[in-house]
Amino acid sequence: MTVTRQGSLKSLESCSDSGSSCNSYSCSDIHSDGSSTPYDSTNRLNTRRCSADDGKNKKAGNSSSNSSEKSGNKRDASSQMQPQTMAMSSSEFNDGNDDREDGWYAWAIAAAGCILGMLTLGVTRAHGVYQEHYVLNEFPNTASATIAWIGSVQNMMLNLCGVAVGVLSQMCDTRILCAASALTMGVAFILASFSTQVWQLVLTQGVMYGAAASFPYILGVTVPLHWIRRRRGLALAVVYMGSGVGGMWVSLLTTACIDRFGRPWSHRILGLVMCGVGIALAPLVVARRPAKRPARLLDLSVFRDWRFLLLAAGSFFAMGPNTVPYMLMPTYVAQVLKEGTRLGSLVVTIINVSGIFGRFAAGVLSDRLGPINMLVVWVALAAYSQLGVWLPFENVRAVVASAALFGVTGASIVGMILNALATIYGVSRITYISGLIYMTYSVASLVVVQSSSLMLDTVGHGRDYTWPIVFSGLLLVAAALVFLALRLRLCPRIFAKL
């Protein structure tokens, strides 16, 4: 028996003017035989025809009944236009109501995801230290745009392989996937220690590490959502805190190792850490299996959903410039402000440290005010950190302030997008659906970072950072507008929780 969940934006008209939730209503699942069963969507948004559960007047109830009668006739047409979405309840998993949900076991999985984030996204966030070393010391006669390919490809592969992670996680044990990829990550960095040319670093530190890191990264941030339901925003804050903490200690460790032992040994030390810690944490990456296996492992029907398309477009504009401050601020401090290299690594540390507080603030506020509401606000503030703080003022204070504000806001965006996805589509296949979104990140990070580096080399002559800053700031403005359009189309009530 197939189930089609139908409806339109009318299901969101039950929003009240102040402090209400657009996703608090009851509706029915329409089965292929015309019967219906109650469906609880308290924790999830769907653009379906349903009855408003606010009991304000009888007219609402009558219109709801009429909608239910008409839905049988429109069932077939609607099922072709709307992709099937997932429920956000324990019944979507084959183990039913697991007593370990929201308990210590669930939070242990979230803690494991946090540490895996240190070894994956945290390492990419600290790549600015390597970028600075390559530009100023190891390859001083090579264009910065050429050297930027190392970090660009690394970020691209980290996100591009998200679809592969989503597909393989439905077929294989996620613990085995995590252990094997952690071993590959370490080997990639050890091989990078023997690389002496840019193209070799692109293959090892870029392609090989990025592709392998995609597995523990995406599994680490999505698997905890299978186990935590009540405080999902806080859980994502804990998980993504790993990238901030990891970016902080990895940047400090990398700088210390390069200064004392040289760049090759810094790669070897990090590679050994990745192997040991990643394999040790793999047994905790336990994914729950959906109650009903998907008909197709590679299901692209979600691309027909306007909600997904708006989220993907906003993610493209938001996550492309998300890596620009990490990459360009260290060299900006050294070349424009004429400060030492230690201040450049300190700026990266400031971004990561402030990101810890930003993620917790974003998680708590998302649970209270709604993830999509906070996503719009956070992206707008990230744009201001570039255009309103970094761009107008050419001094150390402005760079530090911009790094701190961007760390609070920009570093939290990826987690807030994932929370929005879980709110709309549920969590049983969140690894696969988020993998499709991560695919847009890969293209965006490659295009934006390379374009920014090219602007710096051509228009800026390697010294003027104006156009790269403007470029990244305007992309964040575009992202804020797209997310605002999504928010208003889901529910036009300004003060509704969404």
Image: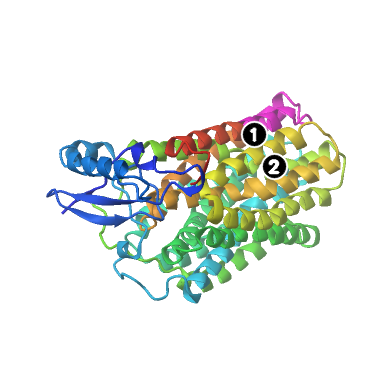
Reply above or below: 161 against 184.
above
Q: Is 216 in front, or is 91? A: 91
Dominant secondary-structure state across the stretch colored magenta: helix
Q: Quadrant of residue 117?
A: bottom right
Q: Amino acid at mark 2?
A: Pro
The three-letter amino acid code for the residue at tag 1 is Ser
Q: Nearer the viewer, residue 13 or 236?
A: 13
Write the residue at 66% across / 40% down.
381
Which label is found at residue 290? none
Residue 472, disc: 1
Q: What percent of the width, then of the height, locates residue 482? A: 51, 33
Which of the 4 image quadrants contains residue 82? top left
In magenta stretch: residue 310:
no
| Residue at the front extreme, as displayed | 57
Q: What span is colored magenta in the figure?
A: 450-474
Residue under label 2: 325
Horizontal and vertical percent position of residue 273: 62, 67
Q: Position of residue 201 (x, y in %)?
A: 61, 48
Q: Residue sitting at 66 percent across and 34 percent down?
A: 145
